Image (cartoon, rainbow, N blue to C red):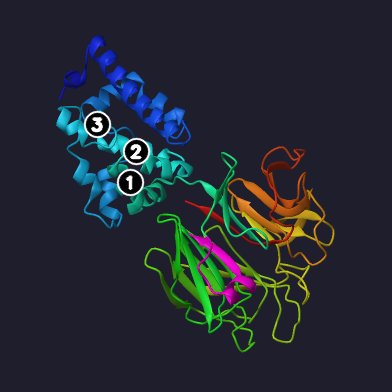
Amino acid sequence: MEQTQYKMDSSRVCQFKNLIIARITILLHLLKTLGGDPYALHINILAYLLSPANILSNAFGKQLTNISVARLDSSISHPRKNISKQYSKCQIGSEEQSANCLLPGLPEEVALECLTLASRSNYPALACVSRRFRSLISSGYLYKLRQKLGIQEHWIFVSTADMPWEGFDPLITRWMPMQPIPCDLCFKLADKESLAVGTQLLVFGREISELAIWMYSLVTGAWSRARPMLHGRCLFGSASLNGVAILAGGVDPKGRVLNLAEMYNSEIGTWKPLPSLNVARKSSAGFFMDGKFYVIGGLTQDGQSLTCGEEFNLETRVWRRIMNMYPVGVQACQSPPLMAVVNHQLYAADKDINVVKKYNKEDNTWNVVKELPVQASPTGWGMAFRGCGDRLIVITGQRLVYSEGIVIHGWRPEGDPHETWEILSARERAGMFVQNCAIMGC
């Protein structure tokens, strides 16, 4: 069929372009008025939408990109009834149709794609624009769509003795206070461990009567109790990937060092058992690399330092032991190994010589690549070392201008090797001891 039916004269193109500019300008103005970032709809999206080729295709309901939101919706479980089908009839047309659209004047597949590219920091402001926006954001659908499209932003969640949990967006350097955990005093004062998986932040600890897990949902912005593990434990190795997390090893409430492993599915909130480790261990570090889960270092029941690691293949469900993977080892009084993965490369913070090392997968060796930005404590406690997007992140306590606080340092290991650590943010009155840190990418 000839493509002439999709052609428009220059005046029609100009008219349609002005309509898009007007609609998006109004939305940006609303966001700014409500305290949101005026660049919530990224300028690149605006430029893309306003290119003549895309204006022509959008006018006749063609795809903005090669991605079909309608097809995606069939593969994404959604709590509401098929939101893309609900909005599919919303095109350029009558005033009544436009009033029911997410972004009046734009086809719904285009509007949804715009919103998936908007910064997650601006979702609260977007939810104030209209009931339709609020319903869409509170449903969690955008997060699932972002995951399907491979769109990720990384946030840092930190807690200290003087600062309950707060989130930090390194893209716009904004701190985001969170509600306190509605836990008992025992949980508040006891040691805790944390893990971000999907859109959830899990905090593990002990209440007066039993071990407990509190979950913060990014979708609802509230804390709730999470389902307990199959085998309660602490001092385990853990990591997450694509909405699932694996916990391995640790110590049970009776003090026994475990070789048990289990997987958490954040989509349905359930735990399921996995094959056991070859070696029982506590105080180990866990991470995902190249789609496989690893646990490294740690201590045995007798307190002996482990230098081996283990690799778990999610497809074959088999653990493979890797000898001498972490030759530094761990002492009883020290923190678990400080490990971070950036772009499928493994890095470690060696507190003994205060450097960052990179793991060579080919010959199972470590090489020094950078000095740490500050002096680490002899035990490794009180400092966070994580991978955040394409950066390595180091968070430590320092004496700031007005009080004691924490400083977030970032460095891109695949950039200029001579580049210095960048200070991303300093948080006053937060204390100098980092208790927990988790990186959430969604």
The magenta segment is 180-198
Element class at badge 1: helix
**Amino acid on which disc 2 is placed:** Val
State the separation of the CA atoms marked 2 and 1.
Answer: 8 Å
Any part of residue 317 in sight: no
Task: Give the mark nearer the N terminus: 2 vs 1.
Answer: 2
The answer to whether residue 385 is above or below residue 256 is above
Q: Is residue 292 left or right of residue 7?
A: right
**Amino acid on which disc 1 is placed:** Arg
For residue 62, the mark is: 3
Residue at screen point 74% across, 57% down? 432
What residue sits right under mark 1 in the picture? 134
* Few, some or many residues within 10 Å of mark 1 (<14, 14–19, 20+): some
Element class at badge 3: loop
Verify CB contact (< 8 Å) between mark 3 and mark 1. no
Verify CB contact (< 8 Å) between mark 2 and mark 1. yes
Q: Nearer the viewer, residue 395 or 221?
A: 221
* Few, some or many residues within 10 Å of mark 3 (<14, 14–19, 20+): some
What residue sits right under mark 2 in the picture? 129
Residue at screen point 41% across, 34% down? 31
The answer to whether residue 10 is above or below residue 135 is above
